[in-house]
Image (cartoon, rainbow, N blue to C red):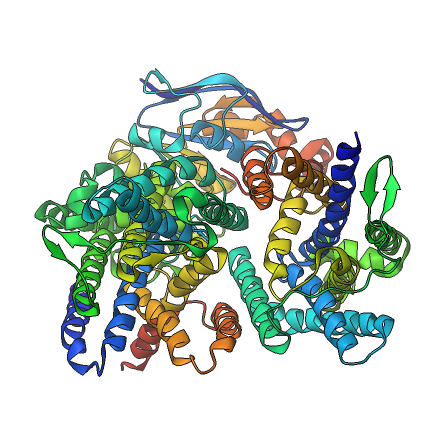
Amino acid sequence: MTILETERLSIAFGGLRAVDEVSLAVDSGIVFSIIGPNGAGKTTLFNLISGLYTPQDGRVRFGGDDVTGLSPHRLARRGLSRTFQNLQIFFRMTVLENVMVGRHRHEGAGIWSELLHLPSVGRCNRNTREAARAALARVGLQGGADQLAGTLSYGALRRVEIARALASEPRILLLDEPAAGCNPVETQELDGVIRSIVNDGITVVLVEHDMRLVMNISDRIHVLANGRTLTEGTAAEVRSNAAVVEAYLGAHGVSEAAHAVR
Amino acid sequence: MAHRLAGLAVIAVIAVLLPAFFPSAYYTRVATLVFIFALAAVGLNLLMGFAGQVSLGHAGFVGIGGYSVAIGATYLGMPTWLCIFVSAALSGLVAFLVGRPILRLRGHYLAVATLGFGVLVGIVLTNEAAWTGGPDGMTVPRLTLLTWQVRGADAWYWIAASTFLGGAMLALNLNDSPTGRALKAIHDSEVAAAVLGIDVSYQKLAIFVVSAIYASVAGSYLALFNGHITPDVSGFLSSIELAAMVVLGGMGSVAGSLVGAAVLVVLPQTLTVLHEYEHMVLGLILMGFMIFLRRGIVPSLAGAVARRRP
Amino acid sequence: MAEFLQFFFSGLTVGAVYALVALGFTLIYNSSDVINFGQGEFVMLGGMSTVFLAAAGMPLSLAAFAAIIITIAVGLALHRLAIEPAGDASPVTLIMITIGASIFLRGAAEVIFDKRFHSLPPMLGSAPLHIGGAAVLPQSLVVLAGAGIIVVLLWLMIDRTLLGKAVVATAVNRLAARLVGIDTRRIVGLSFAISAAIGAVAGVLVTPITLTSYDVGTLLALKGFAAAMLGGIGSALGAVVGALVLGMLEAFSAGYLSSKYKDAIAFLVILVVLLTMPQGLLGKGKIERV
């Protein structure tokens, strides 16, 4: 079943077509990666899908419904969640509180109950806290829950963001360069985290530069270059595609690489 | 983890015991003013401290609250206690209408837009002399509850203190709730809050309206307590003082709002000898805190205490 | 027609004063991202210092000159003692610091000077000139000429001198400027000094017409800011254009509609501009808007 698809999605900034007629379809329950050289439009595509940008052309369909142009919070309510390339952590809060915010769409307390702190709010807080701890455990961070978010390492904060997104119980999770700035050990742990997320039935769409992670974990890979789709296929197919190699290395780089191999 | 209302209980005890130490009605008056301004400051703190949205024009709502009571009671024959509620609703409505467009702005653009709003309210209040009495203001009838006409500093002390405690309790309750977490999230990253399902514009508008209502009630109390109101109450300087109370005491700290209000109300009183220097001192305080002690008094003290613990 | 010209000239005159305040804002904003609410106090200090120094016996031109020097010193002090120590503070914190500074300066003026209105003798006599049926004070022409000269000098400095280039570089990218060896701290200090000087000159020139007192600064700062916003914050030409437009709007609405709400125009302008075209008429500033 196709859980997410885009149809000729396009947006231009000034004269630059950042995303140019990109169409893709993501089956539910797989790891779908989007790769491409810098400036290919990957994060812009993510921003279009997650409602941060409104496309100038094309459609986005989520779970069969047309969600083009819906704001991020509406998409979140439908079960689409994402993390950010440039860490959008709530630095003034503790790690646990960060993840608790992820539960927002499952907390039903009304403003009056909150102002009066009726028992339902106390219960809601307790449930949220438990669910947040569970999400932290899934990414292996159950230890540092009460630390101020600002004290954690970069790699740990990436996992906090994932835990936070998981806490919202999404149907699909968009991960924007989760391995950026991670050392090989952290990247390996990330591999395990992503696999366990997919095991729980959540579809993962990944934008990533770390090719080893991408090749190991992806069921399908979509390659972008200059805002346009270059190709799509399994890891093996993409790896051996000459056009992909050329897009990353450039024509000159390809011949250089050929020299290097010899 | 201390109960969220523990600090408030301490303040309540102090509030009850304090009048015993007042040598004269003058002190009761000053304390009443502190609680009234602290109420407005708590409301502004919800907006600035929790949600991170700066407002340099909040005295505008204080003015609306005060003048609505004055005009309603004087010209429309409404009972004063009812006027308090009606002006709160009016301020809420104004906040809703003004807030929707203005809250799309961020940072210093939001600051200046709110500043403009506050000054505009002041100008209208000064100019529409037929209703408002112009620059010299107008008299306000005494508060009447059923048959009891509230006079005297003592009665007002209890009214102001209990309203502040009530308002503070609501704020502290909100702090420990989904909405409180959502507001604090918005403060740190609006985009992250949005992708987690938080309707950012709605939350910002809601808290803007709530904070306007706090300010309005404070303004109504001020008018009824003083028996008089002038457009200054809504002026640029008053808005800055309100923001200063929040900043001084500590953004996001409810107790801090009380501290900030206490400092900025008591200080001019203690400087009566040096009354002329009042503005200089206010300016110095504002600069000093924003440069050196941005977190405010209460969070800085709490931080210092936490660091001392082994 | 005569009435129209009357409002036109008065709008032009007050617009010229706003232009000098707005230029000061723009200069400081461009080099340091600070919105300096003390800008209005510079104008006040220029006028009030001249008045009191002259009253103390100094010859008028010397008093004016000394007043400008004093104001420049205040501007530098503001930068060194209030803005510099704040370091990397957020824009809102910086605004509140400059608001605090303007309140402080106002309070100091209250104490050092007094709370009354003061005037200065006009520079070209007080007999009004008649232009097309409108009565124009010669001082108005002095204000316009003065503002014009300052704008030209400023433009020459920015465009033709190495120092000017350094200011522009600092405005465009502070880090890059430092990397090529520009002492950005001195450049920012310089922009404060120049803004203070411009404000003081405006104060000296306009006092014969509008009088001065310890609290004229606040409203001037707000209106100068409105003008800068209207023209597009960050654009010097925009500051001048916005200021003249604002001055005209004020004069014509005061003349044809209601003079009570003259001051409200500036604030309405602020709100309308921020909500509909935050980049202003000619602006290129960074806008934060959802």
Q: To which quarter of the image does residue B224 belong? A: bottom left
Q: To which quarter of the image does residue A151 belong? A: bottom left
Closer to the camera, A240 or C107? C107
Rendered location of residue B129, percent (x, y): 45, 45
Rendered location of residue B269, percent (x, y): 38, 76
Q: Quadrant of the N terminus of chain A?
A: top left
Relative to B291, does residue B308 appear above or below in the rendering?
below
Closer to the camera, B227 or B36? B227
What residue sits 43% from the left and 41% below the top? B191
Rendered location of residue B308, percent (x, y): 31, 82
Q: Is residue A199 left or right of residue A177?
A: left
Q: Quadrant of the C terminus of chain A?
A: top right
Relative to C88, does residue C59 appear above or below in the rendering?
below
Closer to the camera, C200 or A157? C200
What residue sits 10% from the left and 45% below the top? A120
What residue sits 62% from the left and 44% below the top? C286
Q: Is residue A192 visible?
A: no
Q: To which quarter of the image does residue B38 belong? A: bottom left
